[in-house]
Amino acid sequence: MRFDTLSLSASAALLFLSSSSQFTQAYILPPHAIPAPGLVARQEPVASAVNSTFIACLKPLGAKVLQRKTAGFEKERYAFDLRYTYNPEVVVMAASAADVQVAVKCAKASNVPVAPRSGGHSFEGYSIGGQDGSLVLDLSGLNSVKVTGSGATAEAKVGSGVRLGPLYLALFNQGGWTLNGGTCPSVGVGGHTLGGGFGLLSRKYGLLIDSLLEIEVVNADGNLVTASKTQNQDLFYALRGAGGGSYGVVTSFTYRPIKPAAKATSFTYNWPLSQASAVLKAYVEFQPTASRDIGVEMNVAPDGLMMYGIYQGTKADQATAMASFLTAAGKPKSSDVREGRYIDGQLRFAYIYNDPKDINALGLTGGYKPGDSRYTKGKSLVYPSVLKTSTINLLKKWGAKTPSGGTANYIIVDIWGGAVQDHSADETAFIHRDAHTVFEFVSEWDENPDWMNDMYAEFLTDFKANYGPVRGYQNYIDKDMPNWQDAYYGSAITRLKQIKKSVDPGNVFRFPQSIPLP
Ligand SMILES: Cc1cc2nc3c(=O)[nH]c(=O)nc-3n(C[C@H](O)[C@H](O)[C@H](O)COP(=O)(O)OP(=O)(O)OC[C@H]3O[C@@H](n4cnc5c(N)ncnc54)[C@H](O)[C@@H]3O)c2cc1C
């Protein structure tokens, strides 16, 4: 499937970069797009076999309940990833925490698994259940963002169906605030926060979970409870890193918002792949001493290497902060460094427009270029130390290869460190505090995922030889991850299973990679 074909249909919301295009090219996906006819073969939903007691129980929710073969269901059963053809039993379009409570109680009584959906970006379709027969709880109606207080005690209460773009815009409009999440505007706060949440402010302020003060969550009994450092502490621990879909349905997050620097400098640098060895070596060696004001990511693809990021400060200070890296990396083919407000950088790297002018575009309320869903696969590796030459050589080798039958492949190399490491590995369920560098491998293809599998096998062999136990980032969830419980949660898995037993002994919140009962 080619992007240019895909881009003929649909309306809003997710960036992807194509190896056959410039890095700055935007590809925008709709939240739950219906593929254009003829592009995708899908299973038709079969008539519901669920018992009438379940449906009767949901009756108080009225038209918010979409059953198979009823109007609106077809549109809502899609994930952005076209690999998935799961058929939920029902989709509930929740408009309040009370709706969520009704739905969870009914699901529990009829033993139907519950799949909460915030932004719908799960790489394995887990917010449509990851299997047939779930109750999908769409949370897009829980969309409020409210900042109260000021200064160091300000709080931002955010509905769990809010997406990152609208979140950043609403925070900006309520006093120039922001948060330390990722760049893609259509990713939902729900899944993103509960799996950690890394973004361009994380080296300075930590992960999104590190900004959390309180979480409201509907538990397996259908009760609305609060988890924080003083209430339901075990649940608060588990939700921060292992929370996606396993312990309850989060209805709101309360964060400590961040006031970014008055002036911020966004930047891109491009190098040809022929310079990859020097650039990547300089990049990973830069990590430990790099200023925390530098938030940066690097894409490796057949087009070459593109570094992009935002510095908290002026253009002159950015040049000083990056000087040692740039000298070691070698002269870029091109660069584009712009001083402005932090939100201008956020908009720029939301990839909504090549030359963004209107910050209101972050609201995802319209005005987007066409795009579409696609077949995609994501994988990850979390490196605990500076990369060895063998790993850099693999990046160079696989970055240069275009998959046969596919349209895009790239590897995103993020240097972490900084404030991510200010928290101990057992403070939250997010264990990768020592991460030096994190890779996200992304492949998009017509029908042949072998490229991804062959590449990942080589990286795994190299990892095992050089870095110890294999680790992956749970927000890039991958059903093929070897020993996924260890890779995502390490030794925390024992505690996480115990917490699961105490809050959800009936396993209401289950999908193929949910935290299991002990
Ligand atoms: C284009 C793209 C860009 C990305 N960029 C980044 C990035 O910069 N940094 C980063 O760290 N990650 C990034 N990710 C990964 C992203 O953080 C995860 O895919 C995340 O899980 C998506 O959250 P979501 O709410 O959109 O997804 P969903 O599919 O809605 O949810 C993901 C999982 O969380 C569960 N869940 C969702 N909402 C709730 C809730 N309210 N209560 C309980 N469980 C819930 C779902 O059931 C599912 O299991 C990116 C992903 C994509 C596709």
Image: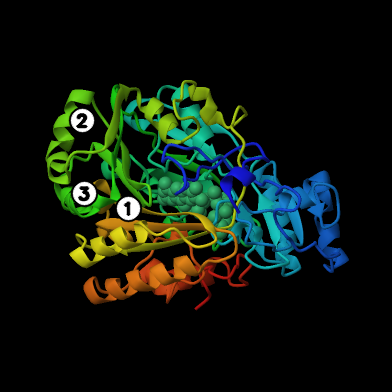
Q: Which of marks 3 and 2 is in front?
A: 3
Point out residue 448 in the picture as x, y percentages from the top left corner.
Answer: 55, 66
Find the distance from the CA under tag 3 to the CA under tag 2. 18 Å
Query: Does residue 99 appear in the picture of this structure?
Result: yes
Pick the residue in front: 406 or 296.
Answer: 406
Q: Which of marks 3 and 1 is in front?
A: 3
Find the distance from the CA under tag 2 to the CA under tag 1. 20 Å
450 is higher (above) or lower (below) than 291: below
How would you rate the neighbour count of disc 1 (Cα within 10 Å): few for under 14, some for 14-19, many for 20 or more? many
Pointer 1 residue Cβ closer than 8 Å to ligand 1: no
Which residue is painted at 23% across and 52% down in the image? 280
The furthest residue to the bottom:
518
Pointer 2 residue Cβ closer than 8 Å to ligand 1: no
Query: Does residue 193 appear in the picture of this structure?
Result: no
Which residue in the protein does label 2 denote?
318
Judged left or right of residue 57, residue 368 is left
Which residue is painted at 66% across and 47% down in the image? 32
Residue type pointed to by label 3: Val
Pick the residue in front: 13 or 443.
Answer: 443
Residue type pointed to by label 2: Gln
> What quarter of the picture does the N terminus occupy?
bottom right
Element type where label 3 sits in the image: helix
Which residue is painted at 64% across and 54% down in the image? 79
131 is higher (above) or lower (below) than 136: below
Q: Earlier in the sequence, mark 3 or mark 1?
A: 3
Pick the residue in front: 369 or 107.
Answer: 369
Q: Earlier in the sequence, mark 3 or mark 2?
A: 3
Which residue in the protein does label 3 denote?
279
User: Could you say which disc has been placed on residue 413 in the image?
Assistant: 1
Q: Earlier in the sequence, mark 2 or mark 1?
A: 2
